[in-house]
Amino acid sequence: MALICNARSRAARLLPQALSALPVIGRPNAPKSQASLGNEPGRRLASARAGESVSPLSDECSNQVLDFPGGKLMFSPDMRFLSGSTGERVSCYRVLDDNGHRISDNSFQELSEKVAVKMYRDMITLQVMDTIFYEAQRQGRISFYLTSTGEEAINIASAAALSNEDVIFPQYREPGVLLWRGFTLQEFANQCFGNKSDYGKGRQMPIHYGSSKYNYFTVSSPIATQLPQAVGAAYSLKMDKKNACAVTYFGDGGTSEGDFHAALNFAAVMEAPVIFFCRNNGWAISTPTSEQFRSDGVVTRGQAYGIRSIRVDGNDALAVYSAVHMAREMAVFEARPILIEALTYRVGHHSTSDDSTKYRLVDEIEHWRSSRDPISRYRWWLERNGWWCDDAESELRSSVRKELLQAIQVAEREQKPALGELFSDVYDIIPSNLREQEQFLRHTVKKHPGDYPHNVPA
């Protein structure tokens, strides 16, 4: 027993000396822990399998690389986690300051007087259209409406920078893109009133516009479903070697949907010529962006998927026009996806079904309406160029209002689509179950005529 005790005592004395000679594994500057042994700083208890050699940190670790899919990777002895934030926010590109003065030494895409004035006229037209249709809904003449108030520059300036061959996959706050391409006020009114001249044959809610003539896919209410569709269309354009791209619009709330992430990854991997245009207007109905994400907005998400991205002042028409113009050049001629995050503010309620004063301060809304209005800022720039004046403003607003009121009267008097249109345009040969439903509906309308609109042809 004495021999065993002496052996244990000698081993206990020699163990610290033996362990102190082991190499360091871990971070060189790691603090000592209870497991640290020896007097040398940074030495930590480590173990190695039998027969395994352990190299000191000064070996060729930093010179070794791993040829992994996506590129070569350097090794590092440091265990370092990437920060959740860089600490510095991505800057926001702008051309005009809040007073409509061009910022010195900035780069932007020049535009002619003709294009510049048309952009402004369409911004005013969109604003007047929103006001009158909103009032029509409040009068009970249409069932629903949704405005683009405060986001007119995003609508019109982005549309102006695109080609009519580019395919649009909108959300529901981009009627200005359709307006720019030639959709008339009468066509807008026909859709909102759902009459027989409505291209959707009255099957859609108001503001769910669509036009095959203008390459504008019909608005779909579910959030972000249009994003992967746009990528598929863009890839098709690429395969057909078209000099065009797909453009899809969505709000900040849409980035919380799985379709957003699937679409960005799909586009990056397939190198699809698509522009993702995010209208970050601060609110997804009543949900603020602070509850949508912890990242620096949306622009950083593009980089995470390997997509070239930019943040732009969405209330600066020239900045939006310039960014979209350059984005289109890269998308079409370099066959790559682009992400644009436009910072703006939804001045109006989310829709006629919403009262935004329940979750936003009235002072906040008024600040953006008065101090950061995109139309006023752009008008000041036009006036300094001698391209606009008060008389032109008054004449334009008066003529647009008169034309739209006339269009509403025509649309309101127009007959509704025939009852049978509810069951057409889906199947080549209507199946028996739908025919039964149609017969039952006709019987019900005939039995209770007072409960159904009189202007719907049987």
Image (spheres, rainbow, N blue to C red):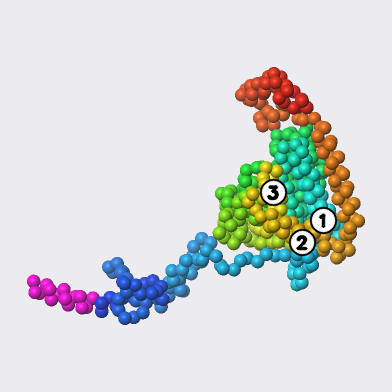
- Residue depicted at 62% across the width and 43% down the height: 222
The circle drawn on residue 349 is: 3
Quadrant assignment, res 446 = top right
Q: Position of residue 382 (x, y in %)?
A: 84, 62
Mark 1 neighbour density, 10 Å: few (under 14) some (14–19) many (20 or more): many
The circle drawn on residue 120 is: 1
Q: Is residue 334 above or below residue 126?
A: below
Residue 330 visible from this viewpoint? no
Identify the secondary structure beneath mark 1: helix
Quadrant assignment, res 34 = bottom left
- Residue depicted at 65% across the width and 42% down the height: 221
The range drawn in magenta is 1-15
Magenta stretch: includes residue 236: no
Q: Confirm or deny contact between disc 2 and disc 1 (CB under 8 A).
A: no
Residue at the limit of the structure toward the left, as seen here: 1
Could you tell me how far apart the alpha carbons at marks 2 and 1 are, in whole angstroms? Answer: 11 Å
Identify the secondary structure beneath mark 3: loop
Q: Position of residue 147 (x, y in %)?
A: 73, 47
Closer to the eye: label 3 or 1? 3
**Residue denoted by label 2:** 318
Could you tell me how far apart the alpha carbons at marks 3 and 1 are, in whole angstroms? Answer: 23 Å
N-terminal of the pair, mark 3 or mark 2, is 2
Magenta stretch: includes residue 7: yes
- Residue depicted at 77% across the width and 47% down the height: 130
Relative side of 359 to 210, left or right: left
**In the image, what residue type sits under mark 3?**
His
